[in-house]
Amino acid sequence: MEEQQFDPYKFIGIILIALILTWMLFRTENTNISNPNITESVDVSETKSSPKINEFNNSSKNDEINLTYGIFSKWLEPKENEDLVLENKNLKIKISSKGANLTLVNLKDFSNHLEKPLNLVSENNHLINTSLKSRLGLLIDTKDIYFNNIKNEKNKGSQSIIFRANISDYQFLEFRYTLPNDGYKLGFEIRSEGLENILADEDVILSWQTNLFRNSKSIDYESRYTQLTYSYEEDKVDNLSLSGEDEEIENKVRWISYRQHFFSSILIPDILMDEVSFKSKDLTVDETLDNRFTKELTSSFKLGKERGEILSNMNFYFGPTDYQILKSYGDSLETSIPLGWGIFGWINRFIFLPLFAWLATFLPYGIAIIVLTIIVRLVMSPVVYKSYVSQIKMKVLKPEIEEITKKHKNDAVKKQQETMSLYGKAGVNPMSGCIPALIQVPIFYALFSFFPVAFELRQKSFLWADDLSSYDSIFELPFSIPFYGDHISLFPILASAAIFVYTLMTTGQQAMPQQEGMPNMKFIIYMMPLMMLLFFNNYASGLSLYYFISNTLTILLMLVIKNFIIKEDNIKAQIAENKKKPRKVGGFTQKFQKAMEAAEAQKKINQQGRK
C-alpha cells in the first residue's frame, strides 16, 4: 500500500471551506434575530397609521446588501415606504419612513404669490442626513435607512411619531418628532441604544440641506432678503453672503436660520453646536426665468453622545419671519430679522416696530403707513425748520460770496478766509444746513430697513397695490428693461416726482457756485429721482408709499415755513444787524481761520525761499 503524502493544497482548501461555513452560520444567525417588531414600549399593532412593511422579492439585491453591510443590512434592505402625518392648527407635517425625513411642511394659514399652499418643505427640497461609521469602516447614511418600526404617541399637549430602525431587540437607532397642539415648533430627537460597541469612535455628523422655494412675485427682491443667518456664543449674529456662493465655519452655534424673506426654517439645539460648517448658493440666475428656488443652504455639525451612544435633542421652527412671534419662542430668534445694525436696529426695535404694530390694530395697513409717516415728519419738523432757515441765510449771502469768489479767484486761501469772515459777521454757520440732514440719516436708514421685512405688510392691499410687501405693478411690459424690470410700478414714480420737487426747492435756496472739478448740480437734481425710480421699481410698495408721503409732507412743511413762519426780508434785516455788532468768532470758524492763516504764512515762506 502506497504511503500517502501530505498535500498542503488540500489542507488549505479544507481550512477555507471551514471558514466559509463558519461565516455563513454567523450571518444566518444575525439576519434571523427574533421578533423584527419594536420592543414593548413601541408597539406597532397599537398604531393605526403604522405602515405595513412588505419585503421586496429581490433576493439578489438583499444578498448584495447582506454581503456588504453585514449586521447593518436590516437597516438597508428595501421596504415599502410610507408617509406619516403630524398636524396641529398651524402646521401639517409629513415624515417618510425611509430616512425618517420630512417630506412636507405646510403652513396652513398662508399661501404663496400664486395663491397656492405655502410649503417650506415639499417635492424633495429638504434633507436631514446623519452619517454613521462602523468599526469595520462602513459609512451608513440615515437617508438610506428604512425605519420599519413606527409608533404614534399622543400626550396632553403634543403628539409624537417615533421612527426606529432595529438591528435586534436591544440594538436600534431612533428618530422622534414631537409637535405641540399649536405653534410652529417641531421637536426632534436622535438617539441610539446598544450601538456603542458597533459604531466607531469618530463623530456622528448631521447635515441639514434645503432648497428654498420662491414665494413672492419678484424672485430677485425676495432673494435679497433670503439668507442663512446664525447665532453663536452669547448673542452674536452673523450671515452668509446674499449672492453667489459662500462658505463659513463657526463654533459654539446657538441656532441656524434659513430665512426665506417672510418665512423661516430655524434649527435650535438644546446645547451649543461645535464647529458648524455652513454653505450658501444663489439659485436665482435670471429674474425673467420661472425659477422655483431662491437659495440652496446647507449646514453640517456633529451630534452629541453619551457613553458612546448617540443622544441629541433639538427643535425646528417652521413659520413666519414675524418679529413678535419669533421673540415669543425665546433664544433671541428675532435677531435673525435684518432690522439694521447699531442705532438703526435700536430705532426699529424700540420705536417703529411697536408704533406701527399699534397703528395697525385699528387702521388699514396703507393708512397706518401714512399716519406713521406723518408722525415721523412732525417729530422731525424742528430739524426741517433749522435746515430751511440755514438755506435762506445762505441764499441772502449768495451775492457777496460770488463777489468774493471773483475778487480772489486766483487765491483760494484768501477766498476762504474772507468767506469765513463774512459768515462770522453775518452770524451764519455754514455747517448748520448739514447737521439737520445728518440727524435725519438714522431715521431714513431705519425705515429703509424696516418696511422690506415688516411681515404685517405681506399680502395687505392699499389702493392699486395688492401687496404692500411687493411691487405695485400698474402695467406689465412685453420686455424687460435692465435695472428696471418688466413692469411699471406707480408708487416709485410718485416718490421720484416728490424727490425731484424737493431737490429743486432745497438746491434753489443755497449758494452753490459751479467750481472746476465739482459735479454739475443740475445733473444731481435729475440723477437722484432717476435712481429712485430704477431702484424702487421692484421694491416693496409700502416703502415707496412712505417716501412719497414723506417727501410730499416735507415740501408742504417747507412751503408753510416759507410763507407763514419765516420772511426772507426779516432774515436779511437780521444778517445786516449782525454785521453791525461785534461778534465772537465760534470755535469751528476760529480754528478754520487759524488754519487758513497758517497756510497763507507757509505759502509766503515758500515763495520767499524760491526768490
Image: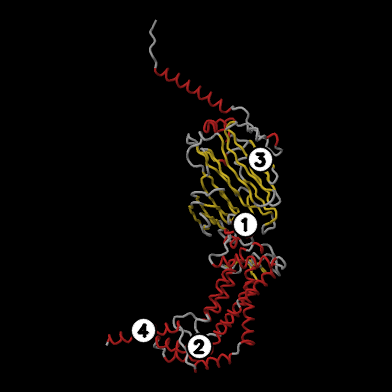
Q: Are marks 1 and 3 in contact (CB under 8 Å)?
A: no
Q: Is residue 489 above or below residue 185?
A: below
Task: Report the residue marked by disc 3.
Answer: 82
Q: Is residue 259 above or below residue 432?
A: above
Q: Is residue 310 left or right of residue 420?
A: right
Task: Report the residue marked by disc 4.
Answer: 598
SS at badge 2: loop
**Which mark lies nearer to you, 2 or 3?**
2
For marks 3 and 4, the one nearer the N-term is 3
Look at the image and name its color scheme: secondary structure
Q: Are marks 3 and 4 in contact (CB under 8 Å)?
A: no
SS at badge 3: loop
Q: Is residue 357 left or right of residue 191?
A: right
For marks 1 and 4, the one nearer the N-term is 1
For marks 2 and 3, the one nearer the N-term is 3
Label 2: few (<14), some (14–19) or many (≥20) C-alpha neighbours in 10 Å: many
Q: Return the x and y of residue 36 as percentages of the image width and height.
A: 62, 31
Label 3: few (<14), some (14–19) or many (≥20) C-alpha neighbours in 10 Å: some
For marks 4 and 2, the one nearer the N-term is 2
Quadrant for the C terminus in the image: bottom left
- Residue 326 is labelled as 1
Distance CA(mark 1)–CA(mark 3)? 33 Å
Distance CA(mark 2)–CA(mark 3)? 83 Å
Q: Amino acid at mark 1?
A: Leu
**Which mark lies nearer to you, 3 or 4?**
4
Distance CA(mark 2)–CA(mark 1)? 53 Å
Extreme residue in the bottom direction: 580
**Which mark lies nearer to you, 1 or 3?**
1
SS at badge 4: helix
Task: Report the residue marked by disc 2.
Answer: 427
